[in-house]
Amino acid sequence: MGIRYPLPMEDTPAKRRWYRKYMRELSDIQGVTYDHNEADQLYEELLDDDHWNFWVPVTHGRTVVGFFTMCPPPHCHPDTDYFLRDAYVRPQYRRLGAMQKALTRWLKLYPGKYNLLVLKSNKPAYLCWLKVFEEAGYKPMELRSLEEFEDVEDDIVMLGFQPTEVA
């Protein structure tokens, strides 16, 4: 039967735990103290916008090993169709193709142009996204600079991807 795909952003204790793991790791990468309350606040913001966020489980076999959240317009860059908002895979399951498989499945169901934000200091994630999208048949694309994104932190880069073969 499998997991219903994608999952709407309703609250569950498991999703909240996954989001805390994700935020703890981001805090470690940024070298800041993990704030449990801040993680919960950001998670609540996702729930408040459940009409446009989708929670996509990342699996390895039958085990859920991570997630990503996806947003369609108008909550993405205007040059793209979707915003990959958050993504996390448990460290012991990285480099096993779980995110590649989950994202490729999503891209087949929802083809289009995508954008995401990556910490510049997280070079492994940056390289991972380039590889994941390339292997799914996508190539990097230029995104025009927008005033509403000027307040994005200095340590963040915005990436854009489009299908290699444009119909």
Image (spheres, rainbow, N blue to C red):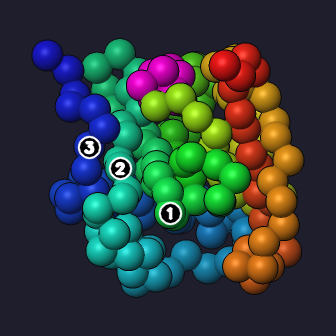
Q: Quadrant of the N terminus?
A: top left
In the rendered structure, which disc, 1 or 3, sits on the residue that comes first in sequence? 3
Q: Give the range drawn in magenta.
A: 101-109
Q: Where is residue 116 in the image (x, y as percent from the top left)?
A: 66, 52
Can you tell which quarter of the image residue 51 is in?
bottom left
Q: Position of residue 15 (x, y in %)?
A: 29, 54
In the rendered structure, which disc, 2 or 3, sits on the residue that comes first in sequence? 3
Can you tell which quarter of the image residue 92 is in?
top right
> Which label sits on residue 86?
none
Q: Are marks 2 and 3 in contact (CB under 8 Å)?
A: yes
Q: Name the residue under label 1.
A: 74
Instruction: Please rate how many residues cluster around mark 1, counting C-alpha atoms within 10 Å: few if below 14, some from 14 to 19, many from 20.
Output: few
Residue name at image x 49 percent, y 40 percent? 90
> Quick one: SS at disc 2?
strand
Q: Do the residues labelled 1 and 3 touch (CB within 8 Å)?
A: no
> Which label sits on residue 54?
2
Q: Give amino acid for label 2.
A: Phe
Answer left or right for 17 relative to 100: left
In the rendered structure, which disc, 2 or 1, sits on the residue that comes first in sequence? 2
Q: Does the magenta stretch include residue 106?
A: yes
Q: Mark 3 points at which residue?
A: 7
